[in-house]
Image (cartoon, helix red, strand yellow):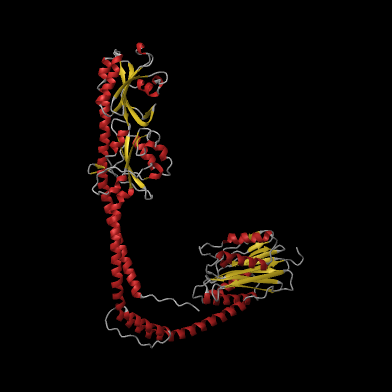
Amino acid sequence: MKKKNKRRSFARRLTRWIAITQFIVMALASYFIYSFSKGFVTVEEASLYMSSLSTANANVERVLTEVSVGTLNHIGEIEENIGNPDKMASIMEKIVAKNSYIRSCGISFIADYYPQKGHWFCPYAVRDENEKIEKRIIGDANNNYLQAEWFTEALKTDSSYWSKPFFERNDTTTPLVSFMTPIRDKQKKTVAVLGADLSLDWIGEITSKGLFLDEDSVNIRLSDNIDMDFDSGFGYTSFINLDWRSITKKFIIDNDGTFIAHSNKDYIIHKNYFDLAKETPDTIDDQVGKNMVAGKTGAYYKKNGLVVKPLKFFDSDFWSVYIFYEPIENTNWSMATVVPRYMIDMFGIFIGVVMLILIGIAMLVTRIAGRYIIKRATKPLKQLAVSANEVAKGNFDASLPIIKHNDEIHLLRDSFEGMQHSLSAYIEELKLTTASKAAIENELKVAHDIQMSMLPKKFPPYPERHDIDIYGMLTPAKDVGGDLFDFYIHNEKLFFCIGDVSGKGVPASLLMAVTRSLFRNISAHIEEPDKIVSALNNAIVEGNDTNMFVTLFMGVLDLTNGQLNYCNAGHNAPMLIDQGISLMPCNPNLPLGIMQDWEYTLQKVELKSPTTLFLYTDGLNEAENIHHDQFGTERVIQLAEEMFAKGTPHPIAIVEQMAETVHSFVGNAEQSDDLTMLAINYIKANGK
């Protein structure tokens, strides 16, 4: 038993569509509000975070400047006392004492500069954990600074610079960096290197005081590139004051990517930014690193004096971040801040959630109120549906409901009433039309049978003869067609023809019948093909008010000697299959029915034994598939060659193979023209 489909209320569907439309409109409005809010918040946050970054950067620069200037201020004193080696340790102590950021300071002289002091001489002052300054003289075979890379490089340098970060030989927990400057004697020869050591621990304290956010950020994955510790936080300034935003982090790298400052102390000196960046599938973080070591700032568009540029975000998960960077002046360092992306998106998400709640409430109210109103308004439609169901069952006199309101439903009721009357009249007219169509189809079937009966239908037609074998086929495009073929033997001569009437259907079939009858009557008295064709032409031209014409190929084959006389009236050249495949030469004569008294030419050829003639109408070579590609004469010849290669084919094999191939080529395309084929196989009686 077929399951009955559950009916769905029109009021419910209309209410649903109204609610959906309302949801789409409000969702679009919410999206634009969210997008605007997000952009506004991003720019404002960028301003605040960039300002904070600049503050942190300035703090680092201030300390570095104090260290470098404080160190350089003592160069004059050192060079004035270059001849007094015992005073050098006191000067080192003075440098450390005057600058609380300097952990230690030492001056390393070249080998044997003071012979009385030995091969190595390096006065050194260091601040201990109790803030006391201790003076030392270092340098010996175990601590050969003369061979150290930093010393040899410093001697070659004419200017001051900050060294790469390092650990002391006896302390692997405190990372240091030194301000290196060359010391010259009175002959301006570099004789020593002055180095003020700065602990990198203070940078973590300074960088924790300044944060920034910028949509010129590069979206990278925390888990892949920077090992962020979210357990501890930093202070920051923002017009959206939320404690969870304190998870922002900063780091500093030098010009080769080595971490100088990082929230994870294990990264300092031991890790390189570019090594971590290689572990990620994207290349944006690599470019950020290149920009940082090149001394660039991560911004390209000016907004109210602040350089910001929003970049397209990557599709990333919750832990995607923004990373911003700025170089530290007078060094080859660059500072960066990392901010989780959701911190910027949170305000826009909040607005979006509120809008979604409002949309949900509005949709609920619309659905309840709208359904009640629409259901009340469409009640007459249900009554009209009951009447329509009665009409569908054939009760065209079923009563229709009375509609009080003069609205569209009332108009529908009046239209339905008019349809009742129209259906009654249409059914009566349809009965008459169906009967008339059935009569026409029956007459066409009779006409088709008559037409087919006029053509040869017995194959083989001459089973008692061994010198001739014939097979023909005609497939009309409609019930009746305009193609024809015919043949008969008279006085040991085979008279045959194949033709194609212009057009299709009943008119073409009538002219086809006339042409076939004329061929039989005229050829019974005349044997010359050109004269037969000329007589056919004059007979068809006379009274041809419809200007129809017939292409015709007609031949007379002498079965005793193989002499073939033929005349072609605008028809396709037949195919000659003997020792090979070729088209018979045909003179360009006009089709029948075009011009009175046209002189048709006679052509002759002697057929060898065995020889097969293959005649066809343009329904074969001009057959089209659904792409309007034609079968073509080339395919006809190619198929004949394939059959010939397997041996001389019989007429029935040629015709049926051609028909099968063309039908396969045409496929589902409608047959556009009548298809007629005739194959004649001739073998001389003596076999020669």
User: Above or below — where is 4 with respect to 147?
Assistant: below
Could you tell me how many numbered marks the image carries? 0
Residue 353 horizontal side relative to residue 7, left or right: left
Q: Image check: 505 left or right of 131? A: right
Is 602 in front, or is 460?
460
Q: Quadrant of residue 141?
A: top left
Q: Is residue 334 visible?
A: yes
From the top left corner, tell me how far across and down residue 484 is, in percent.
59, 73
Quarter of the rendering containing residue 496: bottom right
Q: Residue furthest left?
A: 304
- Residue at position x 25%, y 32% from top? 62
Q: Nearer the viewer, residue 465 or 97?
A: 97
Q: Whole-percent x and y of residue 95?
A: 27, 23
Instruction: Classify the position of the C terminus by image quarter.
Output: bottom right
* x and y percentages locating residue 625 in the rendered image: 53, 64
> In this view of the protein, which residue sits in the foreground, 196 or 463?
196
Identify which residue, 401 or 229, lies in the foreground: 229
Is 83 left, or right, of 528 in this rendering? left
Give coordinates of residue 556: x percent, y percent: 66, 69
Q: Which residue appears at 63% of the width and 65% of the height? A: 657
- Can residue 570 be seen? no
Q: Residue at x 33, y 85 (%)?
A: 401
The residue lying furthest to the front in this view is 130
**Residue 388 appears in which quarter of the rendering?**
bottom left
240 up-or-down from 53: above or below: below
223 over 178 or under it: above or below: below
Looking at this rendering, what residue extends furthest in the top direction? 116
